[in-house]
Each structure stands twice: as structure tokens, then as C-alpha cells.
Image (cartoon, rainbow, N blue to C red):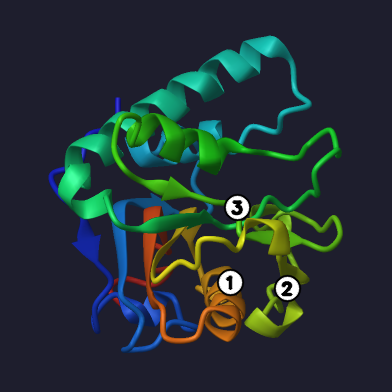
Amino acid sequence: MISYDRLQRIDELTRRDHYYLDADDECYFLGEYTARKGYQYSDTNNAIITLKTPPSLPENRQYHKRRAIAAYSNELRRLVGRNGSEGWTFVPVPSSKIVGHPDYDARLTLVLGRAFEGFTVDIRNLVKQRENRVAAHKDDSKKRSPDNFEYEIDESLTEPIPHRITIFDDMVTTGASYVAVKRILQRRFAGATIRGLFLSRCVHEADFGFFR
């Protein structure tokens, strides 16, 4: 069972793990996911891997995914609360698949909707994929930069104009997808305050002693 003490901010010490982020990026996370480790390694690894279960997999796998959605929703509601959410427009990072694909995944929207139910919170899928792509956690190219994402604004959802935006994702690794979403939102909504909120940040264990 996941449980976190508080929201943590990515700072000058942790930002080096997410090299596309810079000092101007205000980003927060709940827990740490350790790369190249299985679901048994930690509660966060277990929860994140379960949360990313593709929608096309059997119902028994979806049952566990729904439990992970509920668990993260409860943590967000407890740690972000009414004061940290009302007045903000929450924009989920788009699924790697477009609407209509068997593995189009609305998990982020579901987490937010349950977390802030009853609050005056604006949750909008303002940014969408132009075409299907390989999910980031399955992309072995390691070459994806903010310039490589095929994102676009859903113009049908732009009213009312958002002024305070939280980009939401389940994990920040390099920060590329966050920066890609932030750029397109900045171009469309000039002057908006933008921050990031992640369920986890990806960390890598040192391979040789204390050297990293």
C-alpha cells in the first residue's frame, strides 16, 4: 500500500536526474520509482507498474489497476487537497495512443477525477497526441527529446482560458514529455502560470559503489 509523507519539490539536487527540466520548472512528486527494478522492489514501483497496465489486458489485470488508481487518488486528495487544487486547470500528459486505440489509456484523468471529486477543480485534456507512438516506458531509443513529441492543442477545450495550469503525469524520467506539453501550452496560453505534478520521479541506482 502506498503512503507518502508529503509532496516533494524537484530541486537543484534532484533535477540532474531529469535533465530536460531547468531551474524555472516548478515540479512536485509523491514518491520515487527505481528504474530497472521490478514491481516487488518498492511500493511505488508496484503501484506505478500496476497503474500502467494496458487497457487491452484481461480483467484480472484491470482490477489491480483500478485499485492503484484509487490508491493514488486518495494520496493526491490527502496531500494536495482543496487548497492546492482549486483554481487550477489540471492537464494530463496525453496517452501514447490516440482515442479509439485499444490501449488508449485515461488513467491520469481517472486519478484526477477521483482525487478532486467535489472540489472546484478544472480537469481538461487540453493536449492530445497527433498519432500513436511507443509508450515512453517501453521506448528503448533513449533519444526522445521535447522536440520529438507529436502533441497538439484540442481547440474544442480551450474555453474558458486557463491561467493556472498543472501538468499531471504518473512519472517524470528525463522531463521531455513535461517540457513538450509545457511548451505547447505556453504558446497557446501566453502568460499562464504552469507547474508540474507527478506521482513519481524515476531514479537510477548507482552501478559502481557510490559513484553515480
Q: Is residue 159 visible?
A: yes
- Work out how far the residue at label 1 is from the one at label 2, CA to CA, in angstroms: 9 Å
Point 54% across, 24% down: residue: 65
User: Residue 57, how many percent across, how many down?
Assistant: 75, 23
Residue 141, position in %: x, y?
75, 71
Location of residue 12 by image quarter: bottom left
Judging by the rendered image, the residue that carries numbered circle 2 is 149
Task: Give the number of the mark in front: 3 or 2.
Answer: 3
Q: CA distance from mark 3 to mark 2?
A: 16 Å
Q: Secondary structure at mark 2?
A: loop
Amino acid type at image mark 1: Val
Note whether 128 is above or below 55 in the view shown: below
Give whichever of 205, 4 is nearer the camera.
4
Q: CA distance from mark 1 to mark 3?
A: 11 Å
Q: Residue furthest bottom?
A: 23
Label 3: which residue?
Answer: 125
- The three-letter amino acid code for the residue at tag 3 is Asn
Residue at 71% of width from left, 64% of height from top?
155
**Which of 169 and 136 lies nearest the eye of the viewer?**
169
Give the crowd class for mark 2: few <14, some 14-19, many >=20 residues within 10 Å.
some
Q: Which one is earlier in the sequence, the residue at label 1 or at label 3?
A: 3
Badge 1 density bin: few <14, some 14–19, many ≥20, Cα 10 Å: many
